[in-house]
Image (tube, helix red, strand yellow):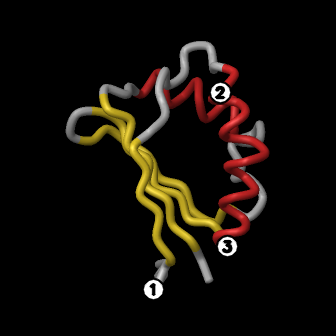
Amino acid sequence: MAYGIVHHFPGGTKEQYEASIAAVHPSGGGLPEGQIFHAAGPSAGGWTIVAVHESQDSWERFRDETLTPAMGAGIDGGFPTPPQETAFPVHNQQTA
């Protein structure tokens, strides 16, 4: 079952997002293994990222092996604090 993640970075900016995504996503603009959707943009009070992974295991592998280590080490110009996170099993997924 697909698994969705919503990250909100209070006070986050486009520049912080660009630096962070460059550090945790594959070069060339692709998605990490197991991620099937990614959207991001400015939102009330900061920056919000929505990602959908093939499964909760896929999300946890990306989080534990890539995202958390990179953010914990600090990303030059990236988001300075962890996000507010909402996670959910995807009940329905539609594409155009």
Disc 3 target residue: 54
* Residue type, mark 2 in image: Gly
Residue to which mark 2 is pinned: 72
The picture places residue 32, in percent across and down from the top left corner, at: 73, 52
Label 2 vs label 1, nearer the camera: 2
Identified by mark 1, the residue type is Asn
Q: Which image quadrant for residue 71? A: top right
Give the answer, above or below, for where 32 lies relative to 21.
Answer: below
Q: CA distance from mark 3 to mark 1?
A: 13 Å
Which residue sits at x=69%, y=21%? 73
- The answer to whether the residues at label 3 and label 1 have Cβ atoms under 8 Å apart is no
x and y, in percent, of residue 29 in the image:
68, 43
Q: Position of residue 7 (x, y in %)?
A: 44, 47
Q: Is 79 placed left or right of 67 in the picture?
A: left
- The CA distance from mark 2 to mark 3 is 25 Å
Rendered position, 95 above or below 43: below
Q: Which residue is mark 1?
A: 92
Are the residues flagged by discs 2 and 3 in contact, CB closer than 8 Å? no
Identify which amino acid the numbered label 3 is placed on. Answer: Glu
